[in-house]
Amino acid sequence: MADRAFQVARLPGFNTIAIMVFVMLYLPIGLLVLFSFNAGPSVAIWEGFSLQWYPKAWGNEQVRDATIRSLIIASSAALISTTLATMAALGTTRRKRSPGQTMIYVMINQPLMVPEIVTAVALLIFFASIKVATGYQGLGYLIAAHSAFCIPFAYLPIRARLEGMDLTLETAAADLYATPWQTFRHVTLPLLMPGIIAGMMLAFITSLDDVVISLFVKSAGQETLPTYMLGQIRRNITVEVNAISTLLLGLTVIMLTVFFLLTRKQD
Amino acid sequence: MKRLLSTAALLLASTSFAFAEGELQLFNWGDYTNPELLKKFEDETGIKVTLTDYDSNDTALAKVEAGGGGYDLVVPSANYVQIYVTKGLIQELDLSRLPNHANIAPEWMEVPWDPGRHYTVPWQWGSVGMAVNSDAFSGDINTSAIFLDPPEELVGKVNVHPEMNDVLSLALMYVGGEACTEDTEMLKKARDKLLEAKPKWQSMDYGMTTKLATNDVMASSYWNGAVFRARLQNDKVQFGYPKEGFPLWMDSVALLSDATNVDEAYQFLNFIMEPENAALISAFARYANGISGSDPFMPEDMSDAPEILIPQEFKAAGKFLPTCSAKAQEYYTAIWTELLK
Amino acid sequence: MATVKPKPAAKTERSTWLLTAPALVLLTVAATGPLFIMLIYSFLEPGQYGNVVWKFSTKAWFNVILQRDIFDGTLTWADAHLTILWRSVKLAMTTTVFAVLVGFPTAWFIATRTPRMRLFMLFLITIPFWTNLLIRTFAINQIIRNEGVLNSFLLWIGVIDAPIQIIYSDFAVFLGMTYVYLPLMVLPLYAAIDRFDMRLLEAAYDLYANRWQALRRVVLPIVKPGLIAGSILVFIPALGAYVTPRILGGGRNMMIGNFIDLQFGQGRNWPLGAALSVILLIFVTSMLILYVRFVNRSTDNG
C-alpha cells in the first residue's frame, strides 16, 4: 500500500527539486561548520585547522549563559504558544464564517503584521512600567512576549491541518458515547499531530531567531544568543559565533539520533 | 588630598578582603567588553559583573529612559552624554571615590560633553575614516572623495556604512560645512553630493572587517578599529583620515541615577582607569582608551598602528560630533530618506 | 468531504470564545494591547531626543501623506513612503512565489515518505534555522560572493572564465529571502498535504485525468489551507525584512522595515514611526482579509 501510494504520488521533477532544496539548505551551513574549525580569526579566509574557538566560545560566560537562556525561552514559548494555538485552532476552524471569526483570525495573526521594532517599543514602555511598579524583572516578560508573537506561527499550520479534516472518525467516536475529551484525546489529537509538530517547530525557531523584541524587553543580565550576536553586525563576525552555531547544530543532531533510537525500539 | 588618600586606603583594604560578594550590572555595546577585564575585576574584588549588550545609542537611551531595567552602568557616546544628563538619567560622580580619576589623559579631561569629567569616565575612542585597498587605488586616501567623488578605479567598488550621523557629517564637512549644521545652503550641497555619488557605490552595509579582508570591498567609510582588524588579515587595507574633516567619537561609562549597586559601580569605574586595565579594554575591541600611561600595557601591534594613532597633520581635521538640534536632526533624516528611498 | 454536524449556534459561538480566550488574553497583554500605546503616540509630538512629548498633534499623520520640502518649504506628496512600501511589497510577493515554487515540491516529497522519514526530514528542514538569521545570511554571502564557493567551483570546472556577479543583485536577494523563509512555507504545506489520501489521486488517474488536471482538481483544493497559511507566514514577515536584503542586496535602498526603524532610532520621530506602522497594520490586515476571501471564493466555485 505504502509503495503504491508512493508511486502514484510521484509528480515529475518534485524529487529533484526537493533534493536540491536540501542541498541548498545545507551548503551554507556546511561552510559555517567548516569555518568554525578555522585557525585564523576570519569567517572567510581559511588559515588551517584548529579547535581553538570551541573552548573560547564555551569559556565565554556571557555566550554560554545566553545560549542556555535562548533555549529555555524558545522551548517555553514553543510549548505555550502551541498549546494556546491548538485550542484557538479548534475553536475557530470548521465553523460557520462570521464577523466574530474574522476578527479572531485577524487578532491571532496580528503579531505578524507590524514591524518588530513597533511591537518592541510598545512592549518596552508597557513592560517597563510593570517592572517599575512590581519590581519583578525576571524572564517572564521575555517568555510572555515570545509566546505571544509565536502564536500565529503555531496557529496557521495547525489550522491548515484541521481545516477540512475528515470528521467521520470523530462523529463515530461520539456516536459510541465517547466523552468530548476522550474523542479529542484519542481521535482528534492524533489526527492533528503533524500540524502540531509543524507549528511547534516553527514557533521554536521563530523564538530562537528573535532579535529586536528581545533586545527591547530584556532586563539586565538577560542576554539571548541573537542579541549577543547583534553586536557583531556592526563590528565583526567572529569565528566564535560559528563555533556556537556548530555546537547548537550538534545538539540537534544528538537529539535527533536519540529520538530515532528510541522510536526504533518501539517498532 | 588627605581624604583622597584615606579613600584609596579604604579601597585598597576592600580589595584585599575580596570576599564581599557583590554584583554589578553593566549595560554596554555588544562585542565591546573584554571578558578578561571582567574576570580580573571579579578576581580582585569578588564583584560579579553581568554584561548586557545593546546595539545603538538610541536603543540604550530608550531602554534606560523607560526604566526598570536594573542596570547600573551605561556607555553612551559623546553626543549622547548631555542627553542623559539633561534627562537626569545619570548621576554626578563623587570624584573623591575615584582616586584613578587623575589618570584620565589631559586631552580627555576637558571634553565639551562633560567638562572636568564629572559624569563620565573614558572607555574607548576612535574615528571614522576611509578604508582603501592599495591594490585597487594608490592615490591619496586621506579624503572623503573616496566615497563622495570616487576615483575611476573605485567606482562601483565602494561601500558606505549605513550610519546616518557619520555619513551626513562626513558629507557636510566635505562640502565645507559643519556637522549638525542648520545652514540650508550647506545641507543642500551635501545632499546633492550624496545623491550624485550614490550610483557609484557598491553597497551600504556593515561587516566590512571581513569584506575588506577578502577583497570583496575595495574601499569603505568605516570605524578605525574595525579597519585595523581587517589590515591584520590583509595588509593591503589602509586607513585614510579625510582632510576635509572626519568624525571622532568617544564612548564613556556613566553611572545611572537608578543604579542599585553604587559602591560596586565606583569600584569598577576606578578599576578601568587603571592604565593596565584600560589597556585590556583596548586589546579586545582594538580602539584607543583615554587613560595616560596605558601605552606600555597595550598589545604590541597597536602601539604603532596608523589606524589608532592619528598623524599630526590630520589631528585638527578630527571633530567630535555634537548633539544635533531637533531641527538639524530633521534635516538629516529628510536627506537620509531621500538618499535611500 | 464531511460537513460539520449542525449544532446550536449559541453553543458553537460560546465554545469558540472559550477555546480562543487564552490565546487572545496572552496576545492582548504581550502583543496587541501595548500597540494601542503606538496609536496614542502617533497623535503626539516627537521629543527632541527620541520618545514623545505629551502634546496632541496631527503632524505625524500629516507627514505620512504630505511632506514639506526642507529647503524651499513647498508641499508635495510624500512619495518616498510609497516608493519604499512598494519596494517591500514587491520583494515580499516575489519571495512568496519563489517559496511556493520550491516549497510545494519539497513539502510533497516529505509528506510522501514513511512516517519516520517524514519526521526526520521535517527536522532536516528546520535544523539550519537553529543558527541565527544574520549568521545564516552571512554564510550565503560566503557562497555567492565573487571569490566564493560557487564562483570558485564554476571556474574550476571551466563553465565560466570570470566570476559572475551574483552578490548585490536582485537575484541574490530573492535567493536569500527564499532560503530564510522556506520553513515557513514548507511546514504548513506539509501539515496540509500529509492528511491527503493518495487514493484520491489514484482514482483521478483511473479516470484518465492527466497530471495537471489531477493537480488542479484533486490536490489543490486539499492543500489550499496549507498554501494560505504558508503564504501568510512568508509574505507578512518578508514585508518587514531588511537584514537579508542589506547583506545580499547591498542595502542601497531602504525597506519599510528599516524606514520605520529609522524613525524610532536616529531619526528621533517616534510619532511618525507609530503612524507609519498603524498604516502598515491597516494595509496588511485588509490584504489578509481580501486574500483569504479571494482564495476561499475561487476554490468554492471551482
Image (spheres, grey):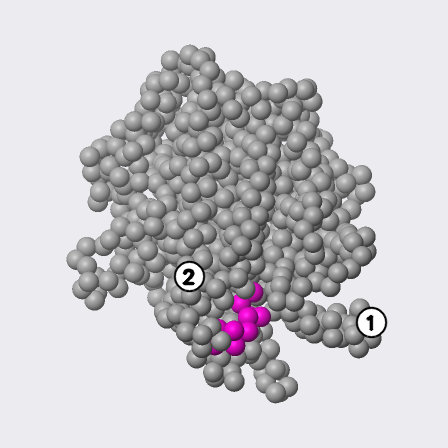
Chain letter of disc 2? C
- For the point 67% across and 64% down, the residue is C3
Amino acid type, callout 1: Thr
Which quadrant of the view contains residue A85? bottom right
- For the point 57% across and 48% down, the residue is C293
Q: Residue B231 location in percent, x, y?
A: 33, 47
Give the residue at mark 2: C102
Instruction: Evaluate whether label 1 is on the same chain as label 2.
Output: no
Q: Is residue C194 magenta?
A: yes
Q: Residue C244 location in percent, x, y?
A: 44, 48
Question: In the image, C130: left or right of A265?
Answer: left
Q: Residue A118 location in percent, x, y?
A: 60, 38
- For the point 78% across and 60% down, the residue is C7
Q: Residue A258 location in percent, x, y?
A: 59, 78
Give the residue at mark 1: A179
> Which mark is in front, 1 or 2?
1
Which quadrant of the view contains residue B248? top left
Within-10-Å neighbours for mark 1: few <14, some 14–19, many 20+: few
- Which element carries disc 1, helix, strand or loop? loop
Q: Above or below — where is C234 with respect to C116?
A: above
Q: Nearer the viewer, residue A169 or C135?
A: A169
Residue A44, labelled with which disc? Answer: none
